[in-house]
Image (cartoon, rainbow, N blue to C red):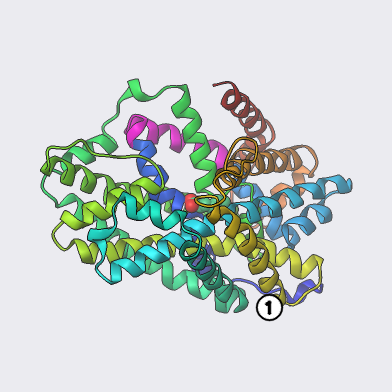
Amino acid sequence: MDNTKREHFGSHLGVLLAMAGGAIGLGNMWRFPYLVGKNGGAAFILVYLIFVVFLCLPILISEYAIGRRTQKNAFGAFRALSKNKNWSLIGVFAVLAAVCVLSFYCVVGGWSVKYLVESLKFNMPQLDSSYFNGFISSSISPVIYTLIFLGMTGGVLVLGIQNGIERFSKVMMLVLCVLIVLIAVRSVTLPGSSEGIKYLFVPDLNALDGKAVLEALGQSFFSLSIGCGTVLTYGSYVNKNENIIASSLKVAMFDTAFAMIAGVAIIPAVFAIAYMHGATPEIGAGPGLVFITLPSVFNEMPMGGFVAVLFFATLLIAAITSAISLMETFVTYEIEEWKVSRKKAVWIAFAICSVLGIFCSLSQGVLSGVKLFGQNIFDFFDKLSANVLMTGGGLLLVLFVGWSMKKEDYIDELSNGHTNNVPLWLLSTIYYLVKFVAPVTIVVVALANFIL
Ligand code: PFF
């Protein structure tokens, strides 16, 4: 493949919004708010921020730098940079991780499409827990919505980097920000919402135990999309004059800010409505919060029908921009390694993810008895990607940068050939964080996760 013909993002803003779009997703909207509340509010946020700054950011920067330096897909990038070809296995890991994450992510994406459609029909009153459980465990409808979601993702990718990913991300990220702020304003203006704000932000050091620290780490990896090759892939479309450190910092800040605003949009509303009925707020992670608790909250809230439409539109946009980054990682790999056209590559990715996605969807119903290592297929893909492939991919990546890549090459890439005025002490600090702190932390946490 001739690299001079490789497409690139057209602007600084395009790079930022595409990368932020990849990072901001379901993880910000259904896991972060819940984890913050459960694990001690502001104290948890502080630990999370320490992980983001000292661990995830250096890894994010490294993944981005490898993509930008090589201008290749995840597999080709490691092959190009290393003398020992075994390192290209990291790329295989990354591409596999992306496909695995997308396989269960697209199912939840499908649920978001369904709930957006239902909210547009002002059908919220019917959407209780038995409706949700009935829907996800049926064999036809959630499968169709999964395919619709994957089809929308593929549809953007067929259009290419600038016309597809960049243009879509620019428009959608703007819409996303406006919507989440509108919902947050509605949430905090409900009577009784202040308890929810306290739950979110008042530090409770007692709730911050070892398990909470592990959860903060896992969430920071997932939220910033580290270890799946998506950052590397987008990095390979970035021009040589972009400041990698500055744009990574902006992506991390954007992602964290969005997660906090999502918390403000969701938790105070749940508290306000629960207190109105003298009930205890039901805040659990994941599907229960988003697809069961929130519809009941929207039902009770003034202008709730309208807020429901805004919310499920937000959820869908957040999910789709992340799915785009995941599918693109596989698509670029196919284009460059299998030498197929973009259109064909998207079709192949669509077909493979559809098959896996269908299995994940059916594992909520007819295939619930099929167990892989004691888990249903959906949970298996979830755990395999988060605990093995993403963490393993992140570990191999930092080992590669710290112990195989030449320090001068790394620093040369981060400083744009010593032209972008990033001070040398900062470059060296990032390098040593990646070389020593990151691998040790990942191994310790993985072991602790195993034991605790
Ligand atoms: N960061 C996404 C979220 O918070 O929902 C999830 C994700 C996207 C993980 C892309 C990994 C990835 F490569």
Which part of the image, by quadrant, shows the C terminus? top right
Magenta segment, principal secondary structure? helix
Q: Nearer the viewer, residue 426 or 111?
A: 111
Residue 276 can be seen in this image: yes
Q: Nearer the viewer, residue 287 or 238?
A: 287
Bin the neighbour count of mark 1 within 10 Å (Cα to Cα): few under 14, some 14-19, many 20 and up: some
Task: Decide whether residue 53 is among the magenta residues.
Answer: yes
Residue 420 can be seen in this image: no
> Does residue 262 appear to the left or right of 423 in the view shown?
left
The residue drawn where x is 65% and y is 28% is: 443
Q: Nearer the viewer, residue 328 or 374?
A: 374
The x and y percentages for residue 315 are 39, 60
Disc 1, ligand 1: is the CB inside 8 Å?
no
The x and y percentages for residue 142 are 47, 62
Q: Is residue 438 above or below residue 121?
A: above
> Does residue 408 appear to the left or right of 270 in the view shown?
right
Q: Which residues are magenta?
A: 37-56
The x and y percentages for residue 5 are 74, 77
* Badge 1 amino acid: Lys
The residue that mark 1 highlights is 343
The residue drawn where x is 29% and y is 48% is: 293
Query: Considering the numbered disc 1 on the image, is that residue within a helix, a strand or a loop?
Result: helix
> Does residue 166 appear to the left or right of 352 in the view shown?
left
Task: Decide whether residue 99 is among the magenta residues.
Answer: no
Q: Is residue 437 above or below residue 108?
A: above
Q: Is residue 76 above or below residue 269?
A: below
The x and y percentages for residue 282 are 27, 39
